Image (tube, rainbow, N blue to C red):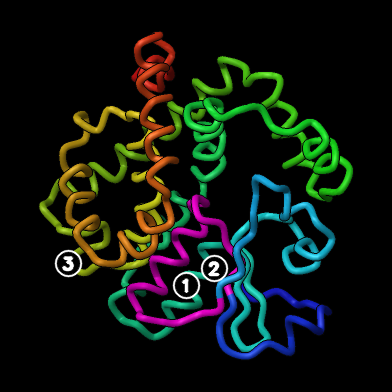
Amino acid sequence: MPQIQTLNSTLTGLTELHLWHAPLSSCSQRVRLVLAELGRTYESHLVNLEAGEHATEEYQAIHPKGVVPALVDDGKLYIESVDIIQHLGGKNDDLMAADADLLALADGVQLDLKLLTFEFLFRGAPPADLDRGRAFQENHKNAWLRQFYLDFQAGFERDRVDFAVRRTDAALKVLEARLADGRPYLSGDVFSLSDIAWVPIIHRYGLMGWPYEAVPNLTSWFARVKARPSYDEALLSWQPKEVQNAFDDYTMKRCEEGTGIRAFGGL
């Protein structure tokens, strides 16, 4: 869904760009990548997901699903990351030289990325505050998200994790095949929204220890996109070193225990 109608007069009265986002949210990273590539300035509204700010009445009045990101452009509201990046790409010929199937594929694996992120990165964090967890369950209106957090706390079933890994692996093989003709970027000779949609996903799986040696074309592509200034501006500068170290330590621990991501889905 592109622009959505909102009765929130606070939003409709805003001018210029306003972005509600979270530092480590992959969907937020997509939007920041486009903004960095375009050199666009924006009013940043950070949403503290760990503190449950996305469950507040105030934020859910902005984003009806209570997730990030949300963008307001001169009073018009956009809430789906792929829709947002297409809106921002606008008339930029290079960015808009994207393939619809690659954007849809990236959108389609987003829930798998969420599940695997929680399993292989966030599970290493200290347990959430019980009072905060209860408040989230009481206040958040997104039933799917409430159940997801309950499932995470109970422990995801092995079959569910295996399925997410297999589906992700199949998607990455599509990208590998697309790059096999020697093209520098996913949609051809120019860096486009196709690449932007996938950069945060590939970055995130790298944190988990995904076996990228099996997809050399994709590995070479990622080296190219990481060299762009927007990668540091939109991703790395928002990823604190202590968080990176915690992810590295937990990934190593899971690998040593034989429970890392490579132990799932037939990788």
Q: Is residue 116 magenta?
A: no
* Camera-side residue of 130 and 256: 130
Marks 2 & 3, CB-CB < 8 Å contact = no
> Mark 1 — residue?
86
Q: Nearer the viewer, residue 187 or 211?
A: 211
Residue 1: tell me if it is visible: no
Residue drawn at 56 percent across, 78 percent down: 43
User: Looking at the figure, which quarter contains the N terminus?
Assistant: bottom right
Circle 2: element type: helix
Q: Earlier in the sequence, mark 3 or mark 1?
A: 1
Tell me the distance, in whole angstroms, between the alpha carbons under discs 2 and 3. 23 Å
Q: Where, quadrant-wise, is the C terminus in this rendering?
A: top left
Residue 138 in picture, x, y percent from top left: 89, 42
- Kindly identify the amino acid type of the residue bearing the numbered disc 3: Asp
Q: Is residue 119 above or below residue 108?
A: above
Q: What span is in magenta?
A: 19-43
Residue 189, disc:
3
Q: Amino acid at mark 2?
A: Asp
Q: Is residue 1 left or right of residue 246?
A: right
- Pinpoint residue 145: horizontal percent, then vertical percent: 72, 42
Instruction: Please rate how many residues cluster around mark 2, counting C-alpha atoms within 10 Å: few if below 14, some from 14 to 19, many from 20.
Output: some
Asked if the residues shown at circle 1 and circle 2 are in contact, with their CB atoms under 8 angstroms apart, the answer is yes
Q: Quadrant of residue 133?
A: top right
* Label of residue 83 in the image: 2
